[in-house]
Image (cartoon, grey):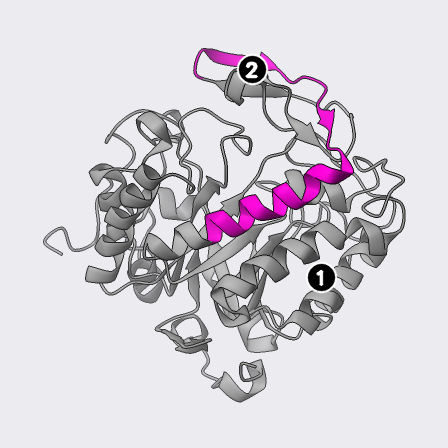
């Protein structure tokens, strides 16, 4: 198991973010993580290309890059122009990215994603209904190639289909290895499939995957075991969002009991990190002040990556106090490929162009200025 935060942390007044950290067999040069950022710029066949490789290479100074959410199967897709990690062409596209990051001295994990009910027949093979633990319609609209369309009521997965879902994760984990990633992060956050199984607001099942907390965490644990069986626990992380209603409006009657139990079970498996969105995704950090993220962090024995609205000072305080081992930054990385250097120098940050956050070409993707344009 990794060293404890107390063993690895040197108490410097302002350097916490820039200390090295051993993550399994990797050596991270700093504690700044690039959070997963959907940019909707995959090409035909949901394949990454040279432009995507440039984007990630520009950000290789992060202690760790976590890729944009990447669907594990055609069934797992929920948005137009997002990349996959299950076909040979997709593996080759991602290899362009990982090679570019490694050549620039960086480290990158693939985030494995199945959206579940947050999809639309236009995005599904054969225009099928999206799948979910139960037939509970999500709020909002789906982003399809022909524009936004209302979400639909999903189809509840049959019990005999669940091994196939786990097999999709295992296949994608193998594909990520062939693509040259350094590890993988299981996406169990933001209202997508695994999160849907975790929550009693979306999981109305009465079989072994529904009802009690123990049953509702079963699929996430089985997926984690399958993925860690391929990568090893020291190269497998997981992302959760205990209180956010993001992606379709998702709720649970007792998130504290649910997520503390999940953290304990994942600790037993030895996963290398827990990546937690604290508060509401892209919103208020104090969205649910009742949930105790410090207690949640203590329930997990591996590294803890904190996320959501962190500034440099908040991040340094979290690491100094032991509340986090690493801190991930999302939107700042869109406009600041050299974010680590800007934080180190206390330099001003570029403002992101929201009109180019999703979709499009190079504009607003690989053309943001750096402090050292010649680098």
Q: Please, what secondary structure does the residue beneath circle 1 have?
A: helix
The span from disc 1 to disc 2 (Cα, nearest Å) is 40 Å
Q: Which of marks 1 and 2 is in front?
A: 2
**Magenta extent:** 145-173
Residue 305 falls in image quadrant: bottom right
**Above or below: residue 272 compared with residue 82:** below
Mark 1 or mark 2: whose residue is earlier in sequence: 2
From the viewer's perspective, tell me whether residue 336 is left or right of residue 328: left
Instruction: Find residue 127 and name its label.
Output: 2
State the quadrant of the N terminus.
bottom right
Please name the residue shown 56% across and 66% down the image.
273
Q: Give the crowd class for mark 2: few <14, some 14-19, many >=20 residues within 10 Å.
A: few
Q: Position of residue 345 (x, y in %)?
A: 30, 64
Instruction: Find residue 85 and name its label.
Output: none
Q: Number of labelled discs?
A: 2
Q: Please, what secondary structure does the residue beneath circle 2 have?
A: helix
State the quadrant of the C terminus.
bottom left
Residue 363 falls in image quadrant: top left
Q: Where is residue 64 in the image (x, y as percent from the top left)?
A: 39, 62
**Above or below: residue 372 compared with residue 18:** above
User: Magenta segment: does it hold 259?
Assistant: no
- The residue where tag 1 is placed is 293
């Amino acid at each position: 198991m990794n060293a404890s935060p107390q063993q690895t942390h040197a108490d410097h007044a302002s350097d916490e973010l820039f200390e090295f950290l051993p993550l399994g067999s990797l050596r991270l040069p700093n504690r700044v993580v690039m959070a997963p950022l959907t940019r909707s710029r995959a090409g035909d066949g949901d394949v990454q290309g040279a432009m995507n490789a440039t984007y990630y290479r520009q950000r290789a100074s992060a202690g760790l890059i976590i890729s944009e959410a990447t669907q594990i199967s055609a069934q797992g897709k929920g948005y137009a122009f997002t990349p996959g990690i299950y076909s040979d062409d997709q593996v080759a596209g991602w290899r362009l990215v990982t090679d570019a990051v490694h050549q620039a001295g960086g480290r990158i994990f693939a985030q494995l994603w199945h959206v579940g009910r947050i999809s639309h027949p236009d995005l599904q093979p054969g225009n099928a209904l999206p799948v979910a633990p139960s037939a509970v319609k999500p709020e909002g609209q789906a982003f399809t190639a022909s524009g936004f369309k209302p979400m639909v009521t999903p189809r509840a997965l049959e019990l005999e289909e669940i091994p196939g879902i786990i097999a999709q994760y295992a296949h994608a984990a193998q594909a990520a290895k062939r693509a040259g990633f350094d590890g993988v992060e299981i996406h169990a956050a933001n209202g997508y499939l695994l999160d849907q199984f975790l929550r009693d607001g979306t999981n109305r099942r009465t079989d072994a995957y529904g009802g009690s907390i123990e049953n509702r965490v079963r699929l996430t644990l089985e997926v984690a075991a399958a993925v860690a069986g391929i990568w090893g626990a020291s190269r497998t992380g997981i992302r959760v969002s205990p209180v956010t209603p993001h992606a379709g409006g998702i709720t649970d009657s007792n998130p504290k009991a649910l997520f503390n139990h999940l953290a304990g079970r994942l600790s037993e498996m030895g996963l290398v990190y827990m990546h937690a969105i604290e508060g509401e995704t892209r919103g208020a950090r104090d969205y649910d002040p009742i949930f105790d993220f410090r207690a949640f962090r203590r329930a997990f024995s591996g590294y803890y990556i904190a996320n959501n609205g962190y500034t440099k000072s908040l991040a340094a305080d979290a690491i100094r106090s032991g509340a986090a081992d690493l801190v991930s930054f999302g939107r700042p990385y869109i406009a600041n490929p050299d974010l680590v250097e800007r934080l180190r120098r206390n330099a001003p940050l570029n403002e992101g162009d929201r009109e180019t956050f999703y979709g499009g070409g190079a504009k607003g993707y690989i053309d943001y200025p750096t402090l050292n344009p010649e680098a």
